[in-house]
Amino acid sequence: MKAVAVLLLTSCAAAAASGAASTLVTRDVYLMGTRARLATAAPTRDQGLATLATALDVLERAEQDLSTWRESSAISGLNRHPVGVPWHAGPTLCRTFDEVWRWHAATGGAFDPAIGRLLAAWDVHGDGAIPAPDVRVRASAASGLALLAFDRTACTLTRRGDVAVDVGAFGKGEALDRVEAALGNVSWMVDLGGQISVGGAGPAEGWTVAIAHPRRRDQPYLHVQLRDGSLATSGGSERDITVDGVRIAHIFDPRTGWPASFDGSVTVWHRRGLAADALSTALFVMGPEEGLPWAESHGFAAIYLIPEGGTVRLAVSRAFRERFGAVQ
């Protein structure tokens, strides 16, 4: 499951990159399990509302596809499909799963959304639990993309065991990519409770975005100007659970079957939303000692916020500095 520290839209110039006067139009809604904010800079309010209505429709349809909370969703259908029987994905989900498999391989398994049984064993979506050793072993054995056969040509997935996909590490990013495909060059910004994507001819200086303090989700720690692409943050400031004095991170290391040990946050920029989503999860799982060198070696823009006593230390990749300038 993906958990994020809040990224807050703090300001926006109501002028397009061309310099033409425009009106800032916003909507606040609740979807995909979070409070979402949509914004556009449009010539008129009516045009802006029409743009946001299109974006909202795309997001709602993405939720119908991807929500594990809805029994009628496509992902829920996959998760209960009979073992050994191919499940047919439509063209859109086929492309989505192709990306999922690609980022799983690229991150050496640090990104692996097929961990629904692990999350259930630790009751991550509830009050939290420390499973008995035999329960944890069974949950680990029923987790991982290795238990799903993906036929790209036929667009089918076949469960090889009682495996379940959790979309927390890629669902928001996928939904944001669908918004981009629908809106094209129209100015837009969507904040899905921690992941922000922008596109089109937006404000010339970009959209001002605040990255939250790693321990205090509602407190901005630093600001960046987002001109294109997507920023995704993974952290545990709000949703980690303590059971019998033991901290249970709700982001799991798929490689070990245990909760991730890092207790700060990491923010990743990528041109594509699903990629930013998956990478922020993977880099959180890796932690700064492993993750920052990995991001540097692959040219990814990432910044770790690492709590140290009463202070926060930043670990920043070269690509992040090049895109967003000096951060402190």
Image (spheres, rainbow, N blue to C red):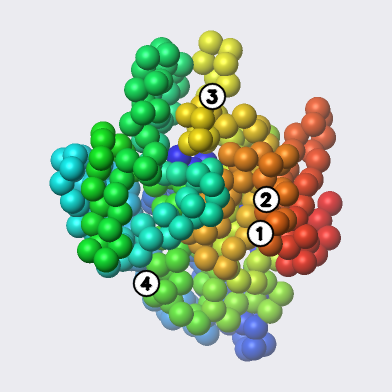
Q: Is residue 131 left or right of residue 6?
A: left
Q: Earlier in the sequence, mark 3 or mark 4?
A: 4
Looking at the rendered image, the quarter that the N terminus falls into is top left
At 64% from the left and 88% from the top, the residue drawn is 18
* Residue 213 falls in image quadrant: top right
Give me the C-alpha separation between circle 3 and circle 1: 30 Å
Please say if 232 is above or below 319: above
Q: Earlier in the sequence, mark 3 or mark 2?
A: 3
Amino acid type, callout 3: Ile
Give me the C-alpha separation between circle 3 and circle 4: 38 Å
Give the image location of residue 318, x and y in percent. 77, 60
At 68% from the left and 79% from the top, the residue drawn is 204
Disc tally is 4
Q: Earlier in the sequence, mark 4 or mark 2?
A: 4
Amino acid type, callout 4: Thr
Q: Which residue is mark 2?
A: 294
Give the image location of residue 254, x and y in percent. 48, 36
Give me the C-alpha separation between circle 3 and circle 2: 25 Å
At 60% from the left and 71% from the top, the residue drawn is 228
Please say if 85 is above or below 45: above
Q: Which mark lies nearer to you, 3 or 1?
A: 1
Q: Is residue 276 left or right of residue 144?
A: right
Residue 248: assigned label: 3
Amino acid type, callout 2: Trp
